[in-house]
Amino acid sequence: MEIFSKSSMGELVISDEVVSSIAINAAKDVDGVSSFYNGPVDVVSTIKQGSLKVMSPVRMIQDGDDFIISIYVNLKPGKKFQTVATQVQSAVKESVQNMTGKLVNKVNVIVAGIDFDEPVKTEPCETED
């Protein structure tokens, strides 16, 4: 899906990759977002279509002239899901609307996981074998 705009001067086409990039750049600036989830939403339908390529963490659905955006994020440990998700919704909606000129009806934030730091290796204490 691409965004099309026509005017007296010509036609403007904005690709999915551009909208995805705008959304990712807006979301990564939110405190609490550590990374993005790139896996397929529905593995069965992906296999039936014959494509196992890694998908974008941003999915768009066009609803008339408006858009619904879903973004899959991984959070940093210790962050509140609701607070981070609300901030991601606002940032993505504002950025996409400002840069494309199209109305964003909804931004669905799906928390795919939490990125924990690698466990710190410690020496066993005297009571451990």
Image (cartoon, grey):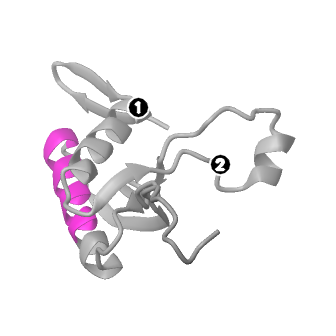
Range of magenta residues: 87-100
Give above or below for 33 relative to 9.
Answer: below
Give above or below for 90 relative to 25.
Answer: below
Q: Residue at the spot x=33%, y=54% of the render?
A: 34
Q: Residue at the spot x=23%, y=19% of the render?
A: 10
Front residue of 52/126: it is 126
C-beta proximity under 8 Å, tags 2 and 1: no
Q: At which x and y percent is residue 30?
A: 20, 58
Give above or below for 129 relative to 46.
Answer: below
Residue 71 visible from this viewpoint: no
Which sits earlier in the primary sequence, circle 2 or circle 1? Answer: 1
Give the position of the C terminus as an image quadrant.
Answer: bottom right
Q: Which element carries disc 1, helix, strand or loop?
A: helix
User: Marks 2 and 1: which is nearer the front?
Assistant: 2
Residue of label 1: 17
Q: What residue type is labelled 1?
A: Glu
* Left or right placement of residue 13 versus residue 59 in this view: left
Give residue 100's mark.
Answer: none
Front residue of 55/69: it is 55
Q: Which amino acid does label 2 sit on?
A: Pro
Residue of label 2: 40
**Which quadrant would residue 74 be assigned to in this image?**
bottom left
Judge whether residue 47 is colored magenta: no
Q: Residues within 10 Å of mark 1 (few under 14, many from 20)?
A: few
Q: Residue at the spot x=34%, y=63% of the render?
A: 76
Front residue of 1/82: it is 82
Q: At which x and y percent is residue 78?
A: 31, 75
* Left or right placement of residue 26 versus residue 18 in this view: left
Q: Magenta span: helix, strand or loop, mainly?
A: helix
